[in-house]
Image (cartoon, rainbow, N blue to C red):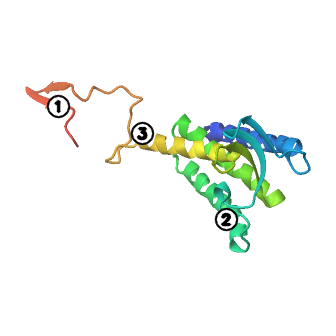
Amino acid sequence: MPFLRYLPTGLITLVVIALDQATKRAIVEWIGPGAVEDRWELAGRLLALEYVENTGVAFGMFAGWTGLVSVLPITMAALLLVVLVVLLRADLNRSLAMQVALGAVVGGAVGNLIDRLRAGYVIDFIAVGTWPKFNIADSAITVGVAVMVITLLRDNQPDGTVNEASTAQPSPNVFTISEGHHERNDIAR
């Protein structure tokens, strides 16, 4: 069954969307519009939960801009989803790490897209120091992209060959003997 190869990505996508939407709903009910307080400090000014309606792009950039910028976040999320579907079809999901990373990024993009389509803004609520507020979807996208980059860098050699680290290979410093000649396996290709 060919669809089973997409199962880890699909499951992670659904988990991220569900967790993102559930936490946003809880924050809206707890410290959202109409609440007495819109901030609950966990570790002073260093870490808090704070209700924010993000009308901007990533990390609140261009908030309050009208015109083209108002459709930019939706366009970016839709474009990101198209790119990720292309990556899935291009078989870049060859490792479990890549499947999980793709699921996290897709789930995060869909979670924020749901907010934008439903309310016209994204609900952010995690406040870390002076860093712009963010949410579970933003975290999933950031971690997913980082894992994708690390996986791609780890799995691809500079000469374009795929690193087969998971299969047994001779040590690069081993000398082999063939037909009376000594050969080094660590010679640059």
> Which residue is rendered at x = 77% and y = 52% of the image?
52
The residue shown at (90%, 45%) is 36
Residue 104 is situated, as x and y percent measured from the top left of the image, at: 64, 42
User: Which residue is labeled 2 in the image?
Assistant: 62
In the figure, is residue 114 to the left or right of 57?
right
Taking 82 as reference, is 39 left or right? right
Mark nearer the N terminus (3 vs 2): 2
Q: Quadrant of residue 177?
A: top left
Who comes first in sequence, dot 2 or dot 1?
A: 2
* Residue with the mark numbered 3: 154
Q: CA distance from mark 3 to mark 2?
A: 35 Å
User: Neighbour class for label 3 at 10 Å: few (<14), some, many (≥20)?
Assistant: few
Q: Which mark is residue 158?
A: none
Residue type at tag 3? Arg
Q: Identify which amino acid the numbered label 1 is placed on.
A: Arg
What's under tag 2, amino acid-wise? Phe
Q: Quadrant of the N terminus?
A: top right
- Residue 159 in view here: yes
Q: Earlier in the sequence, mark 1 or mark 3?
A: 3
Count of numbered badges drawn on the protein: 3
The answer to whether the residues at label 1 and label 3 have Cβ atoms under 8 Å apart is: no
Up the image or down, 116 lies above or below 91; here it is below
Percent coordinates x, y for residue 40 in the rendering: 79, 39
* Circle 1 crowding by C-alpha within 10 Å: few under 14, some 14–19, many from 20: few
| Alpha carbon distance from label 1 to label 3 | 24 Å
- The numbered mark at residue 184 is 1
Query: Quarter-wise, where is residue 68 in the image?
Result: bottom right
Image quarter of the C terminus: top left
